Amino acid sequence: MPDETSRVAILKGALRNSLVAKNVDLNSLAKTTTGFSGADLHEISRRAGRFAIRESIAKKKRQSHVRMARNWDQSDLKPEICREHFEAVLKLTRRSVSDNDLRKYEIFFAQILQQPQVLCTQLRFPHQEQPSQGGSGEYK
């Protein structure tokens, strides 16, 4: 599972095309999501964006249709994702990898590391032939 620094980087990447409010502290969010996978963090970011869109649509519906049509612009397509959107998502989200599954993976990985020769027995690099005059120098 990604460490805290990696989780911040993953969240930044997942949100790179989103408008994120200044009240969103990605470092705090990363601390809150200990044990979450990179895929989990992407899903949290995606769902927070969807919450923001739903909230924006509900707000627009409360306005008159004439005003809504007159005031429509590109910024309506990307509403700002606020801390409250992440808080709402986290109440509904759980980790996709359990502690039990993590332990199984760690045991399996430790066993593999104890037998490194098994990993490399089938790996053979092709012999490099001298490229012919004017050739591309590719392996044959």
Image (spheres, rainbow, N blue to C red):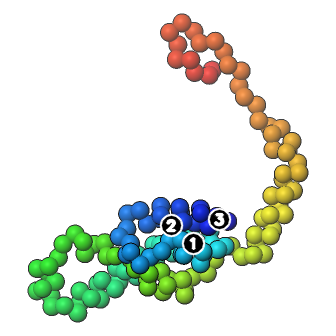
Label 3 with label 2: CB-CB less than 8 Å: no
**Taking 81 as reference, is 125 left or right?**
right
**In this orientation, which residue lies closer to the viewer: 73 or 138?**
73
Identify which residue is drawn at 35% across, 70% down.
19
- Distance CA(mark 1)–CA(mark 3): 9 Å
Is residue 64 among the parts visible in the rendering?
Answer: yes
Using the image, determine if residue 14 lies above or below residue 121: below
**In this orientation, which residue lies closer to the viewer: 58 or 139?**
58
Instruction: Say which quadrant the N terminus sits in.
Output: bottom right
Mark before the other along the chain sequence, 3 or 2: 3
Locate residue 12, reporting x and y percent: 47, 64
Q: Which numbered disc covers residue 11? A: 2
- How crowded pointer 2 is (Cα within 10 Å; few <14, some 14-19, many 20+) is rated as many
Mark before the other along the chain sequence, 2 or 1: 2
**Taking 133 as reference, is 111 left or right?**
right
Mark before the other along the chain sequence, 1 or 3: 3
Label 2 with label 1: CB-CB less than 8 Å: yes
Q: Which numbered disc covers residue 30? A: 1
- Distance CA(mark 3)–CA(mark 2): 12 Å
- Distance CA(mark 2)–CA(mark 1): 8 Å
Q: Which residue is mark 3?
A: 3
